[in-house]
Image: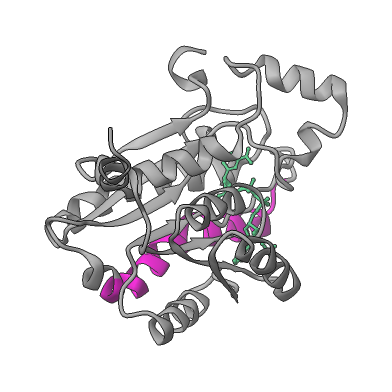
Amino acid sequence: MTDSYYEHLFGVKDKVVLVTGGTRGIGYMIAEGFVRCGATVYIASRKPEACQEAEQALSKHGNCIAIPSDISDVTGCEKLANEIKNREAKLDVLINNAGVTWSEDIDRFSEKAWDKIVDLDGKSPFFLTQKLLPLLDAAASQASRAIVINVSSVNGIRPSGLRNYSYAFAKAGLQQLSVQMAQDLNERNINVNVIAPGPFKSKMTAPLYADEKVEAEVMQGFTMGRWGATEDAAGLAIFLSSKAGSFLTGLIVPCDGGSTAIG
Ligand SMILES: NC(=O)c1ccc[n+]([C@@H]2O[C@H](COP(=O)([O-])OP(=O)(O)OC[C@H]3O[C@@H](n4cnc5c(N)ncnc54)[C@H](OP(=O)(O)O)[C@@H]3O)[C@@H](O)[C@H]2O)c1
């Protein structure tokens, strides 16, 4: 296989990509993959210092621009979309990755723990996609479809034992929402797929590897017995965004070392 054919199949060079929650964890892993493959990558998260640090680190590998944003409500989604519209004429790939979780005993689980998680993990992928549709439309054609990837969780497919009720609800809902959006946006040449991660080391999962004993127990629950790596998250997102993945839409893809399928 020649380098140019490889680039034709899997290349994302020259694509414009937005990764929400791209300042750390899985979002950072995905952003790094796209930057290193030559895309122009926008990342967004709430904390300006985190944005600045991630932009600096990722810019060592290529083009990365961070835009501090809180996308937990429609106004925040619209603001971020307008920032991108001011800079770009099209958006090839939107990765709705930003998410939060909350675990609490069922007897004490509060309305705040419900609304905060559902607003970000469930509602914001819809409204950010809605506000960015003009830019996605501008990138989309039958030959080169625009791509939306919503990051859910294997916890949206099966219970985790973590008592994170609103998170499981939001991630399962996000999956069904994505399939519905894939159907509705198909005629606009926009693919919508879901990556459902298994275990990846991040701030969100830090309590699960803070202690060796706990970490060993957590790993026993996953078929390959290891944490996901940058290449696992970035590789799948890049594949779904490339020519090689363009015939795929409306899919929920667990990125969990086979645990959901065979664990
Ligand atoms: N790690 C795992 O094992 C795992 C497993 C399954 C699913 N997931 C999913 O993968 C995604 C990434 O998780 P992660 O583990 O990488 O989490 P993480 O390390 O906590 O990162 C979350 C990211 O989202 C940003 N964020 C949080 N609230 C935001 C808001 N209101 N507006 C904009 N950005 C916001 C955070 O930055 P700021 O704090 O600066 O806003 C950060 O960049 C989430 O959707 C999560 O549910 C993760």
Q: Residue at x 68, y 14 (%)?
A: 220
Q: From what the image shows, is residue 98 above or below residue 161?
A: below
Q: Position of residue 166 (x, y in %)?
A: 58, 47
Q: Is residue 117 magenta?
A: yes
Image quadrant where residue 252 sits? top left
Q: Position of residue 216 (x, y in %)?
A: 78, 18
Dominant secondary structure of the residues highlighted in magenta in the image: helix
Image coloring type: one colour
Residue stretch in magenta: 109-135
Q: Position of residue 52 (x, y in %)?
A: 70, 72
Image quadrant where residue 189 sits? bottom left
Q: Residue at x 52, y 77 (%)?
A: 76
Q: Nearer the viewer, residue 194 or 228?
A: 228
Q: From what the image shows, is residue 98 above or below residue 160?
A: below
Q: Residue at x 43, y 78 (%)?
A: 84
Image quadrant where residue 168 sits? top right
Q: Is residue 176 visible?
A: no
The quarter in which the N terminus is drawn is top left
